[in-house]
Image (spheres, helix red, strand yellow):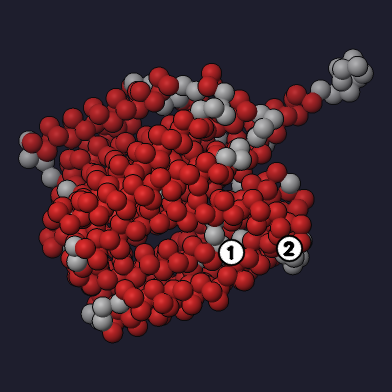
Amino acid sequence: MSSASSGEPSAAPAASHHEHHTKQRAGRDVVLQLATRIANLALGVFVTALVVRTLGDAGYGEWTTIMVSLELVGYFMQFGMESVALREAAANPRRANEWIGALMLLRLLAVGPVLLVAFVVLLLIQQNEQMLIAGLILLIGMPFGGTGGMQLVFQLRVNNAIPMFVLTLKSVLWGAAVIVIFLLRGGIVVMAIALVTTNALGSLVLAIAALRITGRQLRPSRAQLKRLLRIGLPVGISGLLVVAYARIDQLLVFTIAGDVDAGYYGAIYHVMEQAHFVPISLLTTVAPIVAASWPHARARMTRIVSLAVQSLLIAALGGLAFAIVGSEPAVELVFGSEFVPAAPGLPILAAAFAFVCIGYITTNVLLVVGKTRAMVVISVIALIANVIGNLLLVPTYGFLGAAWITLATEVIVVSIGVGLVARELVLSELAPWRFARIVLAAALLCLALELVSVAGAGLAVLVLVTVALYPALLFGLRAIDVGDIRTLLRRGAPA
């Protein structure tokens, strides 16, 4: 007998209400993150400019190489298990604390071996005493660089206000420290001390806030620990390969082309790295919703994924259009005339970033649907292509060769990933015409910027034209749906 005929209330309105409430909360969370991360991005660009000007091209090459090396080794601290713990906790909220506890326990067990390996790596890459000392200081701070599973406490609740506060706190403290170091003409060692201190303070604040919310100790059960290891191993291997192919080019440029080219590449790559706040902000909110939608609400999952990709492409392609025309004055303004030779690499990495954004989504979907082995295969292909390409091009073209290989690698990764994801989504829910209109809007923006630049306009005019014209093109071509904007910005109380 149906619920209607038995006199019981229908479940459909309740489900609709729940989805409506989730959309509102998710929309507010995304807006909060974007606003906070944009403010942090502006501060980060300023601080990075000071770091570059303080250390110079060679010194910044050494600094970036240390950071990349420790990032590669530090990945083993959690081995990509966060995404697995998030998926499992979102599917079974009652055991969320057990999954977070299991993740933190794995991190604790990995600290010793990771620090030992990192020490050996530092001995191999260091070129002078200052570089070695700075590396050792950063190594000591590695356990405080991440937050274990603490951020998942907020992510699962689709409420990332506290993590955004901590992010801002760390940015402000780091920025203040860099200003002082710049004024006092400090060096790479003092930079390392300041970075470790700010990371440790931020992690401490986040951990305290998370423990207050959970209200009890995060004790991992043996069952959750075993399942996390079993499911997470292929995901971790895939993530390690992703980190390797994404960052090994910096080490190859440093080794093959020298510290100056490494400084150029590190500077423009850092710009692309900062832009990752866009997909990260979106995925932080969307990932739990996608995980909860599988496999019983595939149509809803497809709509969410489609909207996420559209939003990311709008941001990425707009940035690409601006980078194609305004890279040289932008690089000179941020990093100084010493780094102008790095400007041609910025549009190349901006194009790669567009594919990176799509890759964030495809990787998340593949994880949710259980295609972890496919993720490993894709990452192996990408790593091989990246290393071979860099070995072939960097000796002749330097950092620009590395930039082109980064773009080619991302094209390969996304092409394979999209093909696999298309088998799991409800294709009728996609809106391919919307993607075409986004591309057209970005192309018209690029053309307009080129005309303005040829007329002699400076960087400020290019920025103003972008800010004014791009939204007009998006709305004029109907690349943006007004209903989607209302969903994101609606702040009314849940019904």
The quadrant in which residue 479 appears is top left
The quadrant in which residue 274 appears is bottom left
Position above or below: 410 against 118: above
Which residue is identified by label 2? Answer: 220
Which residue is identified by label 1? Answer: 148
Q: Residues within 10 Å of mark 2 (few under 14, many from 20)?
A: many
Q: Residue at x 67, y 32 (%)?
A: 295
Q: Residue at x 35, y 23 (%)?
A: 436
Earlier sequence position, callout 2 versus callout 1: 1
Q: Position of residue 452 (x, y in %)?
A: 13, 35
Answer with left or right where residue 354 lies relative to residue 469: right
In this rendered view, identify the residue nearer to me: 313 or 390. Answer: 390
What amino acid does circle 2 point to?
Pro
Q: Nearer the viewer, mark 2 or mark 1?
A: 2
Position above or below: 455 against 173: above
Q: CA distance from mark 2 to mark 1?
A: 13 Å
In this rendered view, identify the residue nearer to me: 198 or 260. Answer: 260
